[in-house]
Amino acid sequence: MTVEALTLTLVVITFGIYIYIGWWAKVKDTSNFFVAGNEIPAMANGAAIAADWMSAASFLSMAGLISFLGYDGTIYLMGWTGGYVLLALLLAPYLRKFGRYTVPDFIGDRYYSNKTRAVAAIATLFISLTYVAGQMRGVGIVFSRYLQVDIVVGVLIGMAIVAFFAVLGGMKGITWTQVIQYFVLIIAFIIPAVAISLQLTGNPVPQLAFTFSDIAESLSQLQVDLGMTEFLEPFTNMTGLNVFLVTLTLMIGTAGLPHVIVRFYTVKDVRSARWSAGWALIFIALLYLTAPVIGVFAKYNLIDTLNETDITEARDISWVSKWEETGLLTLDDKNGDGTLNFMNENSPDNEVMIDKDIIVLSTPEVAELAPIVIALVAAGGLAAALSTASGLLLAMSSAVSHDLYYRIFRPDATEKQRLAVGRIMIFLAVILAGYFGINPPGFVGEVVAFAFGLAAASLFPAILLGIFDKRMNRQGATWGIIVGLVFTLTMILLMRSVQVFGTETQVLENFLGVDALGIGAVGALFNFIIAFVVSRMTSPPPEEISQMVEDIRLPNITKKE
């Protein structure tokens, strides 16, 4: 059976399971729709958190970023994993003790203001929409290569599947679907890592093979010999300032992601929330300790396979020709010598251009692994993208239906009306997500990093101050969120290259040496400063709000959870 046939078979089987779970978990009330009735077991919730958080960026893009950025690519490992620890230890238990449906719900009640709630809901929409664009691009990449369909068709198929189980089952359906998707994606990630580790080093444990072999050093020297930057040399692609700020942005951005935070509301109590965090960290570590190995081994294999290879012979290789058809791999014999020269991707003489997002997907084929492994990786990539996309769609839906429609405009709305608005919003969000999947603003990892920047600059400071600063009031929180969000969004847009009248234009290269990926940390700093200054210049919050903050923080206070 061909790779394409095996992939189609696995996709049909896994999608069938996702659809069945969506039907099985169909809900009729808002509690199950928004927070799964607070009855998800801790271990299952940990797997769902891991699947929700490990998006197409983690599965598809991170190893590719490490392959091309080398040492500097560790910013994604440090930022995303460090951010999860920050969220699990510093914020999640307190938010669960507060016991609401969404992040804007917490912010609205903590800051006793529907205006602040509305601002937080708008920030949630911007963050989630930016994030989901990367997921839909991941879906399109997988389908366009392995099912040999147009990228538009691939995105539409993904939209239909996500819409089905999200609309029907809400958070309950999404959670149990994500549990299955986690195990699909982690098996799909680890099996090829083990296989390529055995092939290159004879050691079946990828992490040990990476540690005790000289593959990384060999790759580093190979890149130097080819005129590329040394793989293990720090700060060759980014300045030290940017490495620090991008890492910080990803960390605090992770701790401010509304679709991840809401997962801690789906368990019955604070103790379960803590156990969920622990299980999720274990599940996440399985992938994040494997990604650097795949990044290094894959880059070594690609150079070894394509460099100084006759271009005609290269195009006769099955995986090369099929990836060329997608436009994500380009071979160009620029000097006319008939052979390929694998050089730095930004070099004008480079004759092999590889999209960062295809490194993980192409690795099993480059290593000539069994077709079933190749198909499994494709199914894993889809699971990673769809699991996160579903969580983001529900975050957007709840921001509108619960935080804006119910809590602000129609507090007398019935359960039926709230569910109807929530489901309609998922359909609208799916359409927007599909558009950006077809017209992506960048590669998966980059787009997702922008979403983390928006979360870092808008929601994280408001949540942190809401828990640990009793003096913080609604005026400070509202203006902090607005300034952080507007500044960061504006800077990202100004520093992005866009087509203006057919010409590639970039208004700003950086902001005081900080690029678009790290600007969220600067936005967060502005948010903290504005929030602190404004709150101290205006009246303090009511006494009952200060007492509520004490209740959240003190473990000996009995409070309904």
Image: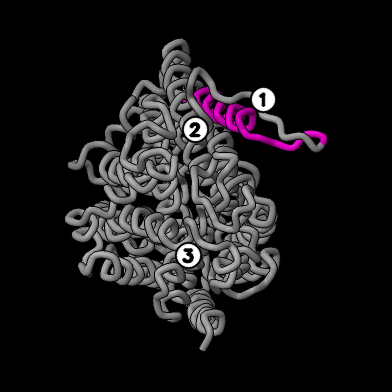
Confirm whether the magenta stretch covers residue 482: yes
Give the Cα distance between marks 1 and 2: 23 Å
Q: Which of the labelled discs sits on residue 259, or is there none? A: none
Q: Which residue is disc 1 drawn over? A: 507
**What's the residue type where badge 1 is placed?**
Val
Label disc, if present, on residue 361 of the rendered structure = 3
**Pointer 2: what residue?**
458
Q: The disc labelled 2 sits on which kind of residue?
A: Ser
Give me the residue at 48% from left, 78% from top.
14
Q: Measured along the vertical axis of the image, is residue 146 above or below residue 247?
A: below
Does label 1 or label 2 sit earlier along the sequence?
Answer: 2
Give SS at disc 2. Answer: helix
Task: Name the side, left or right, on which 517 lies relative to 413.
Answer: left
Residue nearest the viewer, comparing 523 with 379 = 379
x and y, in percent, of residue 208 in the image: 19, 59
Disc 1/disc 3 C-alpha distance (Å): 34 Å
Image location (x, y in percent) of residue 400: 61, 48
